[in-house]
Structure formats: C-alpha cells, structure tokens
Image (cartoon, rainbow, N blue to C red):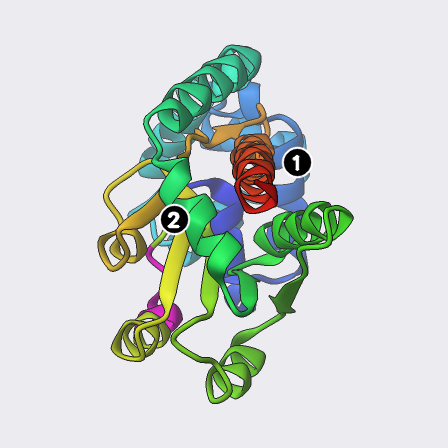
Amino acid sequence: MKLETLINKNYEKLNKNDLHVLQYILSHRESCYDLSIVELANACFASRSSIHRLTKKLGFSGYSEFRVFLKWEGKTKHPTDDLMESFHSDVAQTLKNLDSVDFDTISKLLYQAGRIYIHGTGTAQLMCAKDCQRMFSIIETFIILIHDQVEFEAMYRGMQDTDVVLIISLSGDTPTLIPNIKQLNAKGIDVITITNLKNNKLAQMSPNNIYATTTPGATKEGTEITSFVPFYIAIEMMYRKFIEYKEKQEEINDV
C-alpha cells in the first residue's frame, strides 16, 4: 500500500500539523526513511510526540514501523524504466494474439447482423467503442453505441436474435455486465468480446473473443499507466478483416 493511500484512508483523523509533516515526507520520500524521529521532528518543526501520534493514526505501531514502511516504499522498484519496453512487448503480443483469431466467423456475424451494438465498460473503453463506431460508419456499416448500463438495459428489450453486441472491457470481469451477457445468451444474441489477454468471465461466456495485451505500468510517483493502444490495434484489425470479408461477399453476389 502506498503512503498516499494511507493518507486518504485516514484523512479524517489528521489535523493541520499532521498534514504539514506528511507534506514534508511526500516531498522528501527518498531521504526521510534515513531520519530518526528527532531528526524528522526538527526538519518539520514538529514535536517528537506529534510524529509518534501521526504514525499511530496511519495504522503503524510507532515510528520504527513507519520508517521501515517508508524504506520499503522507497526501495520498491517502479517500472518507469520499463514503460517503453513493456509497450513494445504489449503491441507485439497483441499482434501475435490477433493472428490466431477466427476473424472470418466474427466478420460473418457482423456482416449478417440485423443491428450491431457496441459497449465500453469504462471511459477509455467507451472511447475505443466510439472510434470503432466511427470507422465502421465510413464503410456504411452503422453501429449503435451503448453509453452505460441504463442504456444497455433499455436497448436490450428491443434486441433480436439477429443482432450482435460488441463489448470492450479491460479486465473482462465487470460484475454488472455478467447478468447482461446471460440475458443476451438466453435470447440467442451473439456477443463479441474484446478484452485483455487473461482468463476472464466475459470471454468465458462468449465463443467470439478478441484479445489485446496491455500491461499496467507506473511512474516513479506511483501513477498507474495503462495503454489502450493494443485495444485500438485489435479494433483496427477487426475492421480491416471485416472490409476484406465484405468485399469478398459483394464479389460473390455480383457473379
């Protein structure tokens, strides 16, 4: 657990002096764990007893345990230096994943669909869904965007077994969606999932899965970074494969 998390968790217990001390620690986190309680008190113009009480408020037995925590947090390696390496690896792995996807079946489902719906389970996923909607509209294949759970439930009532629903989810384990997928399956509506490459509930509930690979990273400050570029690549691949399939079908129909 990060120090910021502990502060947020126990914020109501902290007074103005506590926040002053914590501000100093956050600004000097790489050196604070080397300070004794007296040295830290002098640096913050606080008393030894007030710092001891502060550590108690944060859930530690005392300053010694808090100091060990600061040292552990300071030594914990953040993958900042590996962010680009991880990004390249994720893109390469995603392309490899896509080579094994049965896009003919997926393209056939989309081509024969009465209506196509798409839903993203979060803000970034919804942006992916909007871009997918935009791309397909260029080739006059129109997709209905489901913005949220309320719209999902409202639109479900009008869905038919000839429709197809695309779902974009980072984890593939969104609890609120599980009942929806069960309803879609019961109604005979085909579901295509685009999720991160891991064993997940949504993928288990549909035979039509497209996997992206994205590995969470973090800055030195601990800010989490999750790239959705692999998801855009997966959507782009689905789009291009669909165009190829559609053109072949049109050639067949023209003969």
The amino acid type found where label 2 is placed reads Ser
- Asked where in the image residue 177 lies, by quadrant, the reply is bottom left
Q: Is residue 188 left or right of residue 148?
A: left
Label 1 secondary element: helix
Q: Which residue is at a point 60% across and 37% down the rendered structure image?
A: 247
Instruction: Tell whether position 15 is magenta.
Output: no
Q: Which residues are magenta?
A: 173-178
Query: What residue sits 38% from the left and 23% below the top?
Result: 99
- The x and y percentages for residue 74 are 46, 22
Q: Residue at x 43, y 29 (%)?
A: 215
Q: Nearer the viewer, residue 255 or 62?
A: 255
Q: Residues within 10 Å of mark 1 (few under 14, many from 20)?
A: some
In the image, 87 versus 51, the foreground residue is 87
* Whole-percent x, y for residue 159 in the image: 47, 80
What's the amino acid at mark 1? Answer: Tyr
> What residue would you read off at disc 1?
24
User: In the rendered view of the protein, which quadrant contains the N terminus?
Assistant: top left
Is 254 placed above or below 150 here? above
CA distance for labels 2 and 1: 37 Å
Of callouts 2 and 1, the N-terminal one: 1
In the image, which disc is placed on residue 81? none
Task: Give the residue number, with chain letter if any, for mark 2.
Answer: 171
Name the side, left or right, on which 94 lies relative to 128: left
